[in-house]
Image (tube, helix red, strand yellow):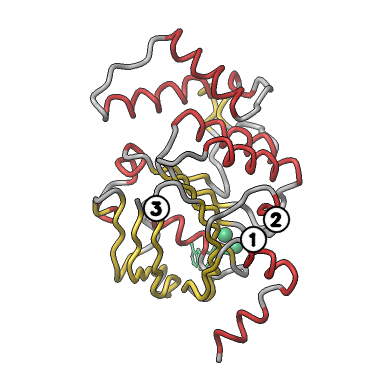
């Protein structure tokens, strides 16, 4: 599904990603962990097409297409979903209208007819149930005045509605309470299928108490310096990142 080969990216002339290699197959959940400032959010930003970053080397293939050659909106239409570490607010646009527009855009791209109002509402009810979102966030303006936890819920709901092939979830390094962690974990677990995949970027080992990743990678100084199964997350929880830094420096 996703093949990242020797990816280098910089901002303001400073190289942040220094040769990332990663392959994600359908059905897999990958966790990317690592100390603050190692380049985790940069990787997410580059994959979704944030133009602040310049890719100066490497290639990324997404479902057989050259991802780096695609406009951000085309990446989304092809089934790439990114949760934002800092979600935008859109005053005056309700979540319902926002979702309907986004979904119908996607349908148009696939050459399908837009959903009828009743089918759309049915889908909304369905997806809310699936990810256990009972509150009435959908009538409010997108993210406007939402608490951190509500933004998270909203994000997972958007993901459930758009049904992406590949979701990249970048979790904040701080401020996610246990409730928000559970919302994220529950959403990821419920939406997991053999034909989709998730990259979970997290500073928190705790999140992995609720989600079983197939692979855990440690990103350090712009490179993936260690990859293993879920036991690696446990090890990091016990020992922190210092041993990885030491191993890498050697
Ligand atoms: P992480 O998500 O792993 O904490 P980031 O990808 O946010 O790390 O940041 C990696 C490095 O890139 C840091 O040194 C950070 O200061 C730098 N960086 C990120 N965004 C910018 C930016 N917009 N301008 C300049 N430097 C940036
Ligand atoms: Mg950070
Ligand atoms: Mg980050």
Residue occupied by mark 2: 174
Secondary structure category for the residue under label 3 = loop
On the picture, is 168 further left or further right than 239? left
* Residue 5 x %, y %: 32, 67
Q: Secondary structure at mark 2?
A: loop
Picture coordinates of residue 7, whole percent (x, y): 35, 68
Q: Which residue is mark 3?
A: 25
Give the numbered dot on residue 22: none
Instruction: Work out whether 189 lies above or below 136.
Output: below
Query: Quick one: label 2, few (<14), some, or many (20+) residues within 10 Å?
Result: few
Residue at horizontal 55%, vertical 29%? Answer: 142
Disc on the earlier residue, 2 or 3 = 3
Q: Is residue 238 left or right of residue 157?
A: right
- Reading the image, the residue beneath label 1 is 203
- Give the residue displayed 67% in from the left and 38% down from the top: 183
Between label 1 and label 3, give the one nearer the viewer: 3
> Who is closer to the viewer here, 169 or 165?
165
Mark 1: give few (<14), some (14-19) or many (20+) Cα within 10 Å: some
Q: Nearer the viewer, residue 122 or 228?
A: 228
Label 2, ligand 2: CB separation under 8 Å? no
> Within 8 Å: ligand 1 and the Cβ of disc 1?
yes
Q: CA distance from mark 2 to mark 3?
A: 29 Å
Circles 2 and 3 in contact, beta carbons < 8 Å: no
Given contact means CB atoms under 8 Å apart, are the residues at marks 2 and 1 in contact? yes
Instruction: Label 1, secondary structure: give it.
Output: loop
User: CA gap, disc 1 to disc 3?
Assistant: 23 Å
As drawn, 184 above or below 13: above
Quarter of the picture holding the C terminus: bottom right
Crowding at mark 3 (Cα within 10 Å: few <14, some 14-19, many 20+): some
């Amino acid at each position: 599904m996703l093949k990242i080969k020797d990816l280098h990216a910089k901002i303001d002339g400073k190289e942040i990603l220094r040769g990332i290699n990663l392959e994600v197959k359908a059905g897999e959940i990958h966790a990317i962990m690592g100390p603050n400032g190692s380049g985790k959010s940069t990787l997410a930003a580059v994959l979704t097409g944030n133009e602040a970053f310049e890719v100066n080397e490497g290639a990324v293939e997404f479902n057989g297409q050259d991802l780096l050659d695609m406009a951000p909106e085309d990446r989304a239409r092809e089934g790439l979903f990114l949760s934002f570490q800092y979600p935008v607010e859109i005053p005056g646009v309700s979540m319902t209208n926002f979702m309907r527009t986004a979904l119908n855009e996607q349908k148009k791209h696939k050459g399908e007819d837009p959903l009828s109002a009743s089918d759309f509402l049915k889908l909304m009810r369905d997806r809310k149930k699936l990810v256990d979102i009972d509150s009435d966030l959908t009538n409010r303006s997108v993210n406007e005045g939402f608490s951190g936890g509500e933004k998270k819920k909203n994000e997972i709901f958007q993901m459930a509605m758009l049904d992406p092939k590949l979701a990249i979830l970048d979790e904040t390094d701080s401020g996610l309470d246990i409730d928000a962690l559970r919302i994220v974990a529950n959403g990821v677990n419920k939406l997991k299928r053999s034909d989709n995949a998730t990259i979970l970027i997290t500073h928190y080992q705790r999140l992995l108490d609720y989600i079983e990743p197939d692979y855990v990678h440690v990103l350090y100084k712009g490179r993936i310096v260690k990859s293993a199964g879920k036991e690696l997350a446990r090890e990091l929880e016990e020992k922190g990142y210092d041993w990885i830094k030491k191993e890498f420096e050697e």
